[in-house]
Amino acid sequence: MRMYLLFMTLFFCSISFAQNTISGSVTDSNNQPVPSANIKIVGENSGTITNLEGFFTLQSSRKPPFVIEVTSVGYGSKKISISSNNQKVSVVLSDEETKLDEIVVSASRTPERVFESPVTIERMGIADIKKTASASYYDGLENLKEVQMNTSSLSFKSINTRGFATVANTRFMQLVDGMDNSSPLLNFVLGNMIGVSEIDVQSVELLPGASSALYGANAFNGILFMNSKSPFTSQGITAYAKFGQTSQKAAGNNDFVDYGIRVAHAFSPKLAAKANFTYMRGTDWYATNYDDKTIAGRTRAHQNYDGINTYGDEVTTNIYNVGQAMVAGNQLPAALANLLPKENVSRTGYNETDLTDNKASNAKIDFSVHYKPFANDVEVIWQSKFGYGNAVYQGANRYYLNNFFMQQHKLEVKGKNFFVRGYTTTEDGGNSYDMLFTGINVNREWKKDDVWFGTYAGAYAQAIAGLFGPTYAGNATASHAFARGAAETGRLVPGTAAFQSAFNKVTNEASVLKGSKLVDNSKIYHSDANYNFKDLIQFAEIQVGGSYRAYELNSHGRIYTDANGPILYNDYGAYTQVTKKLLDDRLKFTGSIRYDKSQNFEGNYSPRVSFVYSAGGDKKHNFRTSFQTGFRNPTTQDQYIGFDVGNAILLGSAPDNLTRFSETRPVATAAGQFLAGGTSVVINGLNAYNNSYTATSVGAFSALAGTNPIAASALLRKANVAFVKPERVKAFELGYRSVIQGMTFDINGYYNIYNDFIGNLNVVAPLYGKTQDAPNPLLGNADPGAQTIHALGNGNFRAFQLYTNTNIEINSLGFGLGLSKKLFGDFEGGLNYNYAQFNFDQAKDPSFEAGFNTPKHRVKVSFGNEKLFENFGFNISGRWNNEYLWQSTMVDGVIPSATVVDAQINYNLPKLKSTLKIGAANLGGKEYAQVLGAGLIGQQYFASWTINP
């Protein structure tokens, strides 16, 4: 009640101030309206934008005289003196190439032109969003230089800049109005699921490359800034509705809808508020890659098939050992059991399309209240954001984020030279589940593994012995097919009531022994501040700032080792930056340094130095160079995960995590039980890190063990896994920007040196014995090393995927070229090219995967005209990339080259204050992949209607 009274008091006090209203129109040299032009009071944050007809209204409590500045992309700016209250003005802007004159804040945490930025920066403004030919503005970010999208789902796309990213891009940050959009549980951004509506976006700024010196540890390979519109400057009701179809061979043609509304009002020059609602719904891209995960060319006919998009077939066992156990239990005669081959057989999996409803959706709600208690000097903002939806996330497995919910709440106070903000991020996993364990446990709900494999073994032995006729006698392929048919008798069929009952039971149970549900109620608490001394110190522009973050991990033991309560830890950092212009303002020097400390690691310093020199008589030739170091702290998953993904345990290396994780494993065969000292063994994280073999050496051992066990044992290598620590990068960059005869040039090159690069190492931990390099089997079972050979040979081991660093240096380098020019009058053409490669001596660390996941060559082109005819415009964009290697914890392979063309036409209806747009993504193109294991991306056709854009 007290808060309500306080709010009402502030409201009525604020509206009592006198208002000065400046109104007018903005047109071009052809007397055509210029929509979305920016009108701002010089020296203040107060401003507004023009509507579709080029009209604007600006309210201010400031008394004349003062000056307003009018700017718009593609035009020269103009300043107008305001000498009286309620003055009306008419502004005519002249055509001028000004892409490099756009104002950005992110590169140096202070307003500056793109032309003056010390690092590579890309920007998308309101006019660019209107022109995008993609189905959404977020999809349209892929047309920016240096951006590569990794599409996991129709509603979940992940941005990659400068490589080393999967769908889970933990080296990239996304800030929405200053708030980190990363999931507290997953440690990476879930696309635009809790981002900004396309009718509320003011601008998007992208910094590819390291930005740790200003933005902290996770701004390692890039950072995206999404800034929403202010209710002071962008008022009224805006709405849009988009309807279309997705088209894919596997899924067919399916409708999708996307609509939203924005309401904003300034009650006075001191108080304003806004609210947004958007909703998108469609059918996801079906994932139907049925290649075997590990063996090229292996089909479902193989007895040990494990398909990429089939789940449940990860459960595999040695069929010979099954037969011997059946002999011991008097279930199978020894003569028949001895006919069983010493090879693995897998259960029959379910297709992904049978384990999800393939629905993709996203609802976003946000509202904010803005109050300026002291004219325009200070603004107090309360903002709340809510995101809800369905999507598929691909990590070690494929996960269906079903009714996933995430919310953020922020209180911020900002002024001309400072800001202080605090926010919290909370998420709820909803009804999300792991599709791999869904397949595994639906199978087990119908028939337990020992029963299924026992049926298979008995049927195979009898078939190959000729007991079921000559067709199978001595024919291994036919006998395997017969055995699978026998074991599959009564299998639950998708679409039946029995299957749905088992599916519902499994997806509502969190234990991986019986279910697949993902439980998550994790939180982040974050605060940061910045102060710029430019009005107090004259010789240079000096800034200081800092941040603090607290984590509360709470998966109830399902994902993290937090079964006994949430895991708490924190980190903090502080930075300072000095900027100085020299040599008649031709040379700009920027130096900064940041210190960050995480609770579990030693502190790190991140310096950055850059020089920008503007050459030529008109200072139109801009040369820049920069050097900076960056670092990335291990994520919450790197430290605290303890997640069973079926064929392995993902295990983090925080010291307290290793003992908190434990698992009881059964020991197969009587001999193994003798060596282990019982029928089961309890293992923990220390076994994985301190007593394991590299998976690569175990694979080589297994391939040779059947024919030459002594030589095979000599191939085994002790893993010697180091605990994970922060990774580091030294980043060098050169660049050039200019406008020459109307052509805008933006060229950059970079070279990065990575040390202590964080990645995954696959190991195999025997359940008994002591690992060592090249153990000798001739020493007998009394020898601890020989015991590990016995354990591996009898399946008495546990596979782990550990988080660690490679001690091998990794280098990456790249080159980017951006060209844009107006052609044939008002036609706009653009060309981008990016080259990227990395160097890593795999021979020195054969078990480590760097996961560069980036094409060596990418080309992007655009061509359009927003003034082709009166109120009519169009835009076409195309992109191409060559094939490249994809490495991930789920599957490795090659992603083919792709050519994609998007196109749109739009028509303005000034009398209705509306814009109509018709567009197509991947127009006429073939389906293509961006993530190996995700659905192939087909075509998207849409028509939209935006009111009061």
Image (cartoon, grey):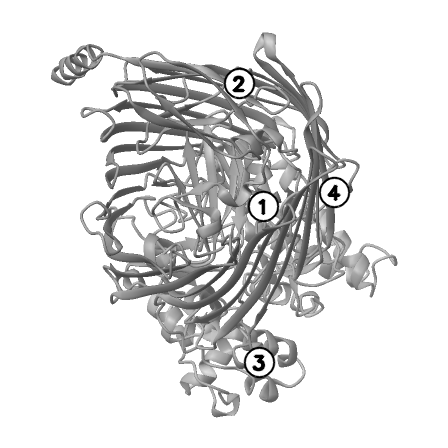
Residue occupied by mark 1: 144
Q: Earlier in the sequence, mark 2 or mark 4?
A: 2
Extreme left residue here?
A: 2
Q: Earlier in the sequence, mark 3 or mark 2?
A: 2
Answer whether labels 1 and 4 touch (C-beta < 8 Å): no
Residue 814: where, in percent of width, then height?
A: 58, 64
Q: Earlier in the sequence, mark 4 or mark 3?
A: 3
Residue occupied by mark 2: 54
Instruction: Indicate left or right for 211 with 925 as reference.
Output: left
Three-letter amino acid code of the residue under disc 3 = Ala
| Foreground tag (2 vs 4) | 2
Checking the image for residue 843, the label placed there is 3
Separation (CA) of disc 4 from disc 3: 35 Å
Answer whether labels 4 and 3 touch (C-beta < 8 Å): no
Residue occupied by mark 4: 927
Three-letter amino acid code of the residue under disc 1 = Leu
| Foreground tag (1 vs 4) | 1
Looking at the rendering, in which quadrant would you find the N terminus? Answer: top left
Separation (CA) of disc 2 from disc 4: 41 Å
Residue 749: where, in percent of width, then height?
A: 55, 64
| Foreground tag (3 vs 2) | 2
Separation (CA) of disc 2 from disc 1: 28 Å
* Residue positioned 74% across, 42% down in the render: 927
Residue 923 appears anywhere in the view: yes
Q: Nearer the viewer, residue 509 or 641?
A: 641
Looking at the rendered structure, the secondary structure element under dot 2 is loop
Three-letter amino acid code of the residue under disc 2 = Gly
| Foreground tag (1 vs 3) | 1
- Height in image: 700 above or below 939? below
Q: Nearer the viewer, residue 684 or 906?
A: 906
Question: How many other residues sit within 10 Å of disc 3, few (<14), some (14-19) or many (≥20)?
Answer: few
